[in-house]
Amino acid sequence: EAGVAQSPRYKIIEKRQSVAFWCNPISGHATLYWYQQILGQGPKLLIQFQNNGVVDDSQLPKDRFSAERLKGVDSTLKIQPAKLEDSAVYLCASSRTGGFTEAFFGQGTRLTVV
Amino acid sequence: GENVEQHPSTLSVQEGDSAVIKCTYSDSASNYFPWYKQELGKRPQLIIDIRSNVGEKKDQRIAVTLNKTAKHFSLHITETQPEDSAVYFCAASGGFQKLVFGTGTRLLVSP
């Protein structure tokens, strides 16, 4: 089966610019996660979708970050405006049925804000 | 919400030794506990998981134990090999099915 696809792989932007990341989960997976992984740290959950509804977004900085999941399949994560501290790898993951089954990760998008 | 703590942050062992990584969680409703391995520059990949109705699970050189009363679980790697060198993350999932990760353990296996 095809894995989780993410794009772009790398992105460099200046602070205060905007950026968007795209994720295509494994077919049939109801749950989609966006994680932020700062170098040397564990993945931090930003938002979790179940189909096209939000399960949790308690750690999403809503003044600058937004996310949507179109028709319960693809998802986009946007940052506007970006700050230097947003430099990180943004990982998308999907699983069949929420937090009780294996989450498969995409390759991630490495964002550098200068 | 769920909080997962992981220790140690770094672990150095000689090839052939055993390695143990420990995690604690805060949400008593958590009932799924996966472990992920992340090699440098790569995505995290599941190596073993355990559900709350099981106290121990083993897969070749890797085992995980769970103590629900104490709210902690551990990863055990026996007969370590240089290719085991990586960062290992524990995670917990429970209320609202959130999947929360620990801070990671960098394991270095020296030949």
Image (spheres, helix red, strand yellow):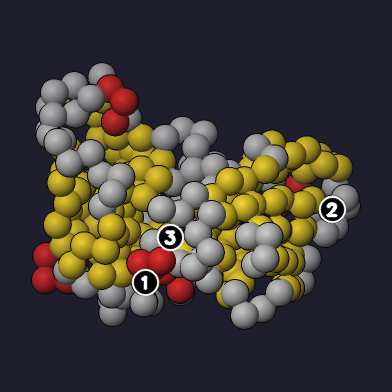
* Residue A31 pos. (x, y %): 30, 69
Q: Amino acid at mark 3?
A: Leu
Q: Nearer the viewer, residue A50 or A87?
A: A50
Mark 3, other Cα within 10 Å: few <14 / some 14–19 / many ≥20: many
Disc 2 with disc 3 on a shared chain: yes
Q: Secondary structure at mark 2?
A: loop
* Subunit bearing disc 3: B
Mark nearest the camera among 2 and 1 is 1
* Residue A46 pos. (x, y %): 30, 48
Mark sitting earlier along the chain (2/3)? 2
Q: Amino acid at mark 1?
A: Gly
Left or right of B63, for residue B28: left
Q: Nearer the viewer, residue A100 or A2?
A: A100
Label pair 1/3, CB-CB below 8 angstroms: no
Q: Residue at x 84, y 53 (%)?
A: B18
**Residue bearing the label numbered 1:** A98
**Residue bearing the label numbered 2:** B18
Residue A71 sits above or below residue A22 on the image: below
